[in-house]
Image (tube, rainbow, N blue to C red):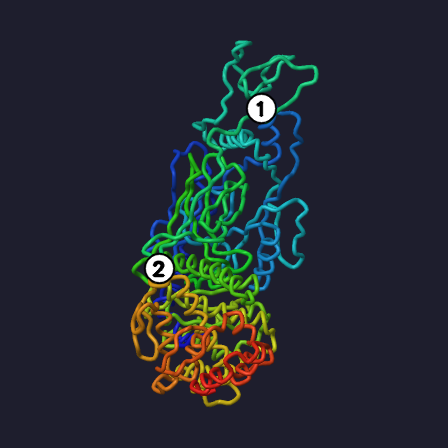
Amino acid sequence: MKKYYFIILTTLCLFSFFYACKKNDSTTLKPSDTSLQANQSSTTLTSNISNDADSTEVPTLLGRQLTNPYLIPNMQQAYANLGITNITVNVTNLYVRFKPTDVDQLMYLDSICDAQGIDLFETPVDYEVISEGDYYQDPNIPMEEITWQYAVVTPNFQFPSNIQHETLAQIHIPGDDYTAVETEAERLAALQDGFTSYSPSISITTSKKTGISPNLASDCPTGFHWDPIARDCVKDDPQPTYTPPPPAPDAAKPAGNIYVYDTQYAANLPVKNTRIVARRWFKTERTFTDANGHFQLTKRFKHKVRILVKFKNANVTVRGLRGVRLWQMLFPIKKSLGVFSGDKSSIVYNFNIYNDLRSKGNRYWAGASTVNADYEYRQYAIQEGVTLPPSHLKILIHPGGNGSAFTPMWYTRRWNDLPKEVLFSLFAAGTGWIGTAINGIVSVLKHQIDIAISYGPSSGLVSDKLKETVYHELSHASQYQKNGNSWYEYLVSAETTETIFNYNGAFSPYGNGTNGNTAPIIALAEGWAYYYGHYLADKQYTNYSSTQYEQGIYYYNSYPVSGLSSHLNLLEDFSPSRTYDPFHWIPQGLFYDLKDDRNENSPVVDQVSGYTIQQMFNALDNDIYNLSNYKNRLLLENGNNQSSQVTQLFFQYGY
């Protein structure tokens, strides 16, 4: 937890919430996707989500339903038209939709689908998209209810018995070598829709040998069959062999790079290990960016394909506080990059920063930065022998606050006892949110978050400050993973107690350090987390670090100590004697003094050096609840290394 975490949202968020709801009430258009219509002009990128600088979320507007080219009869005709008779046109997938009734059902559905590589979509697949927005709500479902969730599943998919579902269509998706069949199937479907201007990628032309101008492959004379490669009626072979037709000329495997702007390096850096989803009609594929931000899909997508980024991987799901439907914040933050055609091998997208703190673009930027911070933390933890945080962490990010955060591990611990005072502090203090809005947030959250992090106005949208907060909170998650439920429950209970008692006051969330039941474990856990967060921020940014502020003092790179980054200067100069700091009793500098090789006399006499990150973390055992016992365990596990100096150092910090 980081201090001042109770300042999270602003009244503007509430206004945008009600505005967006009201705006959607007037939307009565149905579902559909213009980008899926045949014969649209080929472009590199098209998207109706054009203003990420705006904080107002707009609905996706749908038109009429399109004829489904993947229905079995249509696909059978497409194969036949191309002379392909050796393939059984069976049901490869089901196009379905689900109607969860509450948050628990929605999250259960998402988890079982996600485990099978299935992505849920709010927007039906077989409708025109007149205008792509930030969300879609079925016009027959009230805004406060969870809308239909669409998916493409396998025929043997086990439907959850307690969740309403419908099978909308049995479909056949050709193998990846048969994109020419998709082209022909879309041509046939387009003719049924009246799109006579459609030009298939593989055309049926006049036969060079027979002089016949077949309208269909079946028009070849007896004893001949249509060869899609030669584009001719050729004589039947006594034992014919078949090869797939060549892929549609514009069928390509999408690839590209995703970047996020880093304020300290003033450069676009790779977004690492985040999910990429490609979709055209019912054909979907997912992959992840690598350490260079590069992604490469393996399926061919002809003509136009929609590419989405989701800030999610096996380790973490990054969620955002939404201003429209509160249940949306349980899904990962996602961004539609647009619809791509032509050469799809060099898609590039940069997540940037915008002036309005609450803009959609800043939510994407913070989401990308948080995914990167989680990746970096885990790499550093492996290198230094620190226990990794649990996988499948749920992190909620939100604008507002002061770079503040909280790590209750509610989702991982399946904890339901959420004190309303804490939740109210977390999401409403000083913002003017009304009780009904808070109650809505509480009812949705339940046990669905592990970490809450703000990218606040005071700290600004600054890369190293946001990442230092993420590192700090992930260090708590490592403490949980190492020490288990009982120890961590004691920590969360201690901080919850102080938050309630000091609600919205100077000593929230840690207290004044005098409560013997709460202060000892808070000093231990937060002292380590503050240290490790700044230590990792220094490793990541060194002298590119931003100005830091602690105990009423501004710290810069090489000031007050030359050669140290602002993060290390903050730790080096931390003083437990600055009693005007309400949290001077949380020893941020202690762990740094154990490790660094500098011997100094101010602000504390530090004659200790050489303790490693692994040694210090190893002593944070599940039977250690205060710094005095921690000191004894640290010495015991390390042969009483520098015993008298270590004892003196702890004494100067008050332990």
Q: Return the residue nearer the eye: 255 or 174.
A: 255
Instruction: Indicate the amino acid at tag 1.
Output: Asn
Q: Position of residue 578 (x, y in %)?
A: 35, 85
Q: Return the residue nearer the eye: 617 or 440.
A: 617
Instruction: Indicate the amino acid at tag 2.
Output: Ser
Kindly report which numbered mark, 1 or 2, lies closer to the viewer in this rendering.
2
Q: Position of residue 577 (x, y in %)?
A: 37, 86
- Total residue callouts: 2
| Residue 613 visible, this angle | yes
507 up-or-down from 71: above or below: below
- Name the residue: 47% across, 56% down: 311
Q: Return the residue nearer the eye: 372 or 306.
A: 372
Asked which secondary structure carries label 2, the reply is loop
Q: Give the numbered dot on residue 62.
A: none
Tag 2 or tag 1, which sits nearer the N-term? 1
Question: Marks 1 and 2, Cα distance to the nearest angstrom?
Answer: 50 Å
Locate residue 417: give its quadrant.
bottom right
Asked which secondary structure carries label 1, the reply is helix
| Residue 144 visible, this angle | no
Q: Are marks 1 and 2 in contact (CB under 8 Å)?
A: no
Report which residue position mark 1 lands on: 81
User: In the displayed structure, does residue 462 sit left or right of residue 190?
Assistant: left
Report which residue position mark 2 lands on: 359
User: In the displayed structure, does residue 96 sit left or right of residue 133?
Assistant: right
